[in-house]
Image: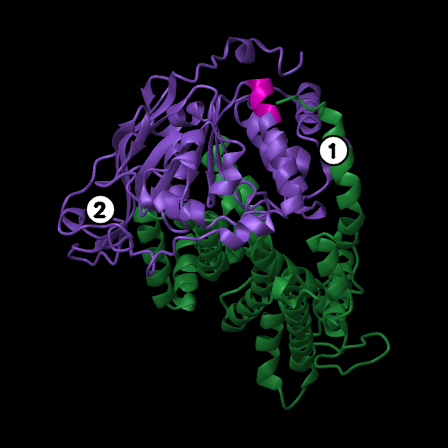
Chain colours: A green, B purple
Amino acid sequence: MATAPSDYVFQDEFTADSTYETGEAVSLWKDAWRRLTSNYFALFGLAVIVLLLLVAIVSQFWTPYPTWKQGIGPTYGGPSAAHPFGLDQVGRDILSRLMGGAAIALAVGLGTALLSSIIGIALGLLAGFYRGWVDTVISLLINVWYGIPDLLVVMLFVVIINSRELKWIIVAISITAWLNMARLVRGQTLALREREFVEAARSIGTRDVGLLTRHILPNALGPIIVQATYLIPAAILFEAFLSFLGLGAPPPEPSWGAMCAEGYKSLQLAAHVTLVPAFALAITLIALNAFGDGLRDALDPRMRR
Amino acid sequence: MTLEASPEVESRVVDKQLALVSVEDVTKHFPIGAGLLGGGSAVRAVDGVSFEVRAGETLGLVGESGCGKSTLGRVIAQLHPATSGKVIFQGQDLVPMRGEKLRRMRQELQMIFQDPYASLNPRMTVGEIIGEPLKNFGLARGKERSNRVHEVMRTCGLNPNFLNRYPHEFSGGQRQRIGIARALVLNPTFIVADEPISALDVSIQAQIVNLMEDLQNRFKLTYLFIAHDLSVVRHLSDRVAVMYLGKIMEIADSHSIYENPLHPYTKALLSSIPIPDPDLEAKRQPILLQGEIPSPVNPPSGCRFHTRCPIAQFPICSEQVPPLESKVDGHLAACHFAGQL
């Protein structure tokens, strides 16, 4: 047959096609952002998170009083102009400690989410992609790990490491928190590896590393981000719990959990010492969960209208 | 340097007597329900298939849904490992190849997929998709790579200005061009096209078929063209193979398959094609096959087609597997009563 000049073919087709295709040219991320910003509960969550981040950053350079300094006012002093949230059992300024606590909470939340996501994603990708004995070993590890109480693991870890520095607390929580992420990524990988574009990528000679990083991981990113946002509040709560038990960051670190623990003995005498950090913790958790829910709805393609 | 002028294309042989790919007794079984103690059965998707694809030709592979034609295509393209048999390409058996050696072979052997929506990664731009094969084999980088991608896009009828767009911004026909460009960019010798037009609008189908013919002539390509109906491959194929339930029923030149089908199954398939002429169409008498296509888990004994064959004679057809053998010069059919319908 006669060879067609290469130009004529595209002229024909794409002018006809591009007209009705451009209307749909909204990427998944833009679409998700549009849905997220129309969800007021999620926006409230986002606003609180931004505020918290600002406070945490400011606290690293300035707080009204040093977070550790005792006796700057009357012990159990109530709220006043100089000390809007009052003073605690050794006369420290609660506002200053609350600000410092925001930094600790966010460091633990973000650090744990990051570290446990890396562990979970790596193991989930390997199990889902290679299947066979790799999957058997990793799935067995996940199931056994599920059976062991998180608190026990963290306590043992803290004892063995013999340090309660914040970075070790983050590591300790992370080694208990990766399980759900690993399960999620494994499931996503099992489904994605059978998709035709992954098969196509194999046919053009893409190596396993490329299949995982260019084809499978980017397509699983939506659920991964949602899962990671849920990890943040869970880790903050867990750290508060550890501090409450006296296993978290050592005094005089102003962890919210530790502040609650120190205050609850005098709950009837000076409720504000406990209530202020507890309220801060609660509103942070609500905000993060609200944002996580909003993100899930925004990224779920079934919600696409 | 343009693609056509490259020494690889210059030295490529077009000799329609010479086998480029030889498929020898290939089977592909998917085990099902294998318990702890083993003993599960298997879907016998491809069950002992032998044929060859000759240098520079288009071999059409036709069959109903579920007959194993797509599986066979994937086995030949080494996307599924064969259960047994050989796929000899350029003198080497691909079946035992693994890892890097197999990956290197893929440069010569490409695939075009059926569904242009599912076969392109939605998270990559068109430029990344078409450039990826070059990246995988370290063939061109930077400016050189983008020049190659531009050139291939133009060759396949795509506007290179759309390099940074995502697949969902294109229509089905354009996406299939992207898929073709991706297969072509490595300058392969052999392309397995798995129903490349069946997901497209009829008006676009002809464009894609013309593009593929154009590319075949310019780059001396060899195609295995899989389709589910005979009318599509008629225009395009030098030879046609008809598959039923994991086996080849008939292989012959396009002309003799359409003018003188020997196998009753081929005859039934041909008689079901509507004729675009009202007078002839009114006189057309389709051979209606009885029943459903049997399960490939437990295929019929003897000739697999005997349960639906209008001319089957018992007990021979249900007991003896008819060999795929030459009936009239070079026209192969697997039927005890070839040409009697």
User: How many neighbours does mark 2 have within 10 angstroms: few (below 14), some (14-19), or many (20 or more)?
Assistant: many
Labels 1, 2: front one? 2
On screen, B42 above or below A209? Answer: below
Q: Secondary structure at mark 1?
A: helix
Front in this rendered view, residue B290 or B298: B290
Q: Position of residue B305 (x, y in %)?
A: 27, 49
Q: Position of residue B171 (x, y in %)?
A: 69, 46
Q: Main secondary structure of the magenta part?
A: helix
For the point 69% across and 75% down, the residue is: A283
Magenta extent:
B214-219
Q: Position of residue B289 (x, y in %)?
A: 35, 56
Identify the mark at residue B303; answer none if there is no mark: 2
**Is A175 placed left or right of B208 in the picture?**
left
The quadrant where residue B143 appears: top right
For the point 68% across and 48% down, the residue is: B168
**Is A266 placed left or right of A116 in the picture?**
right
Is residue B303 inside the magenta stretch? Answer: no
Q: Is residue A212 visible?
A: no
- Callout 1: chain: A
Q: Position of residue A195 (x, y in %)?
A: 49, 48
Tell me if label 1 and label 2 are in contact, CB under 8 Å.
no
Identify the mark at residue A10; answer none if there is no mark: 1
User: How many neighbours does mark 1 have within 10 angstroms: few (below 14), some (14-19), or many (20 or more)?
Assistant: many
**Is A68 placed left or right of B243 in the picture?**
right
On screen, B177 above or below A275? Answer: above
